[in-house]
Image: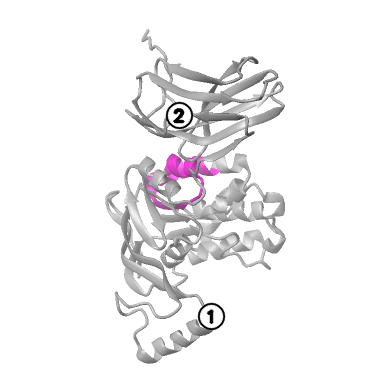
Amino acid sequence: MIEEKNIETTNEVLVKVEGLSKKFCKDLKTSLWYGVKDLISNIHGNKNERLLRDKEFWAVKDINFELRRGECLGLIGHNGAGKSTLLKILNGLINPDAGKVTIKGRVGALIELGAGFNPILSGRENIYNNGAVLGFTKKEIDAKVEDIIDFAEIREFIDMPVQNYSSGMKVRLGFAVAVQMEPDVLIIDEVLAVGDVSFRAKCYDKISKIISNCAIIYVSHSMPSINRISTFVMHINKGKSKIFYNIGEGINEYLFTSTNQHKNIKFSIPEVTIDNFPEIIAVRTSNEIYYQFDLKVVGFKFKNASLYLNILSGDQLPICFNYIQISDEIDSKRKFIFHVEKNLLASGEYYVSIVIYDNGGREQVLWYQNITKIKVEGENHFRAPIIIDGKWKIV
């Protein structure tokens, strides 16, 4: 159900989802047969709870949330978790089997590459088509069309059929239409990942400017971008959802449900190994850190080697590193101790990776990924991972 009306207060709920569920069938033939039976029985979509039939599964199950003007919901989950199904229901492309969706105001959606575009029409003609779908008059679109073309940066090709556009050009035009039409609710899927770096930066800047006047649902596999613009996140896993108002906690749960992330990847030649390392370290911001481990070397001689200790964020982005030259004389076991007098990591979870390069950096002889988790407690302003240790002076 979609309502449209003027929004007067920033506290008013623009998107309300109640008990939303949608199921699919893994087999097309069986799905068609179930559809016929549902039509005959007149029960399709009318019951909030139904048992799954053979070969059926819940794409989304009992989703509930509210989204207000000025808020951005970061929607995260692995491929196949149910994100796209939820977005298509919110955008009115498919109907749920149970539950209710209430959206107030105009909805701008960018949920698939080129979605909503007629490929045989020009970019300019598609701008008018999309504007009309959103409920704008021709006069209102006329007032915005030049801004849309300028934002998309494709003026040279604006009168060319969209079917001849590259993926990046479609993203540019789609995003420009979605944001310049100033919708009350803006839905953005992973499509921004297709655009180039400068355009993505331009998109994030635009989002930061319009978010106070709309509600945004943003889907991405890029946790830094989720962390950057979301006010809260919803993690979907196998159709079920969980809301996190602490964005770091939500991102951590998303990462730990992956079969690939945070698995200790170890590579080393048999003669060089690391032992007796801490699996987890708990520390507060500004406190000191002692990190130690044993490097065991048997029957191997280094030729100008360096050991790197790297610290990565929860989504595996490098944060900082330090290194030490390794003596060529190590021929048994040595204890390495790394002392940090003042921890400048902000609150969150981080991971230690240790790498040894030999022969002047030309040969990798050891790599332990995510060998240790660092849990940092403390203040975290602006969601930045590093706190600058500086002194202020007011003149």
Task: Name the foreground residue: 109 vs 365.
Answer: 365
- The figure's colour scheme reads one colour
**Which quadrant of the rendered structure holds the N terminus?**
bottom left
* Circle 2 residues within 10 Å: few <14, some 14–19, many ≥20: some
Extent of the magenta region: 203-229
Q: CA distance from mark 2 to mark 1?
A: 52 Å
Expressed as whole percent of the image width and height from the top left, the position of residue 4 reads 35, 64
**Which quadrant of the rendered structure holds the C terminus?**
top left
Q: Amino acid at mark 2?
A: Phe
* Magenta segment includes 219: yes
Q: Amino acid at mark 1?
A: Leu
Expressed as whole percent of the image width and height from the top left, the position of residue 209 reads 44, 41
- Which residue, given by chain and number where applicable, does mark 2 sit on? 277
2 or 1: tag closer to the N-terminus: 1
Q: Nearer the viewer, mark 2 or mark 1?
A: 2
Q: Main secondary structure of the magenta part?
A: helix
Residue 303 placement, left or right of 219: right
Secondary structure of the residue carrying tag 1 is: helix
Is there any visible trace of residue 133 in the rendered image?
yes
* Circle 1 residues within 10 Å: few <14, some 14–19, many ≥20: few
Task: Name the foreground residue: 348 vs 54.
Answer: 54
**Residue 28 shows which numbered tag?**
1
